[in-house]
Image (spheres, grey):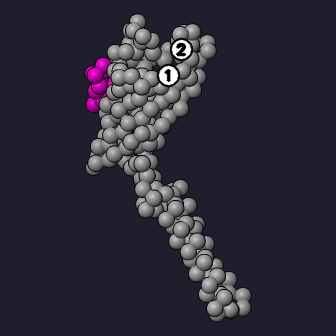
Amino acid sequence: MTNVFNVFEEPWLLLIVAVVSFMGVFIFRDVLPTKGKWVFWVAPTLIASLAFALDYFVQTDNEKVATVIRKAVRAVEREDVNAIAPLISEDYKDSLNGSKKELVWFCRTRLSEPIIEKNVLRIVSLKIQGDDADAVFSVRTVFDPKGPIYGYVQMMLFKFQAEFQKQGDKWLFSKVELIEIDMHPADWHHITGADALD
């Protein structure tokens, strides 16, 4: 998912350059020993510091989309619909919900009682083209022992396909489709009625 050669996404390239420059300083000091030249150590140290600073302070579009996915999965885990709503585009539409308002209502009805104890996210793929992004991610959900579903099943694996739109500097969900439940083809209609656990 990430590119090791993109210094804004991963620090590894600059860390490798820092290690090579440290080795260069060792060799240079062996060949031309100079007394107390601490200045030679500044460049490798600055390069290593720059690697971590760029990784920490600069967030790429890939990282921003992944952050939106993580926030949404965490909000569902906490059953916090108010945290989900700001992550949804105003022109949201999927195969079950025709608008953002319908999706928020759907979330409120499904998350109105304790259901989820823990969600574990795995982003399978993430592609960005211009101001649009597509992602496939899976969520392993452990159900709350106090909830109504726990008596039927303790854990399920859901797989989603999502589309995002960049609006300003933010990425928002424009569509989310449920594509698998426990590695079997599924859609939103599988969790909307009495057939949810079939």
* Front position in the image: 56 or 191: 191
Residue 93 lies in the magenta stretch: yes
Q: Which residue is mark 1?
A: 156
Q: Which residue is mark 2?
A: 153
Which residue is outermost to the right?
Answer: 36
Residue at the image position 28 percent from the left and 27 percent from the top:
93
Which residue is outermost to the front?
Answer: 184
Instruction: Measuring from the top left, give residue 179's x and y in whole percent.
Output: 35, 26
Q: Secondary structure under badge 2?
A: loop
User: Residue type at mark 2?
Assistant: Val
Residue at the image position 38 percent from the left and 25 percent from the top:
180
First to last magenta residue range: 91-101
* Front position in the image: 60 or 153: 153
CB of mark 2 within 8 Å of CB of mark 1? yes
* Front position in the image: 100 or 66: 66
Q: Is residue 78 visible?
A: no
State the CA–CA distance, disc 2 to disc 1.
7 Å
Q: Main secondary structure of the magenta part?
A: loop
Residue 99 lies left or right of residue 4; in this view the side is left
User: Residue type at mark 1?
Assistant: Met
Residue 181 lies in the magenta stretch: no
Q: Quadrant of residue 46?
A: bottom right
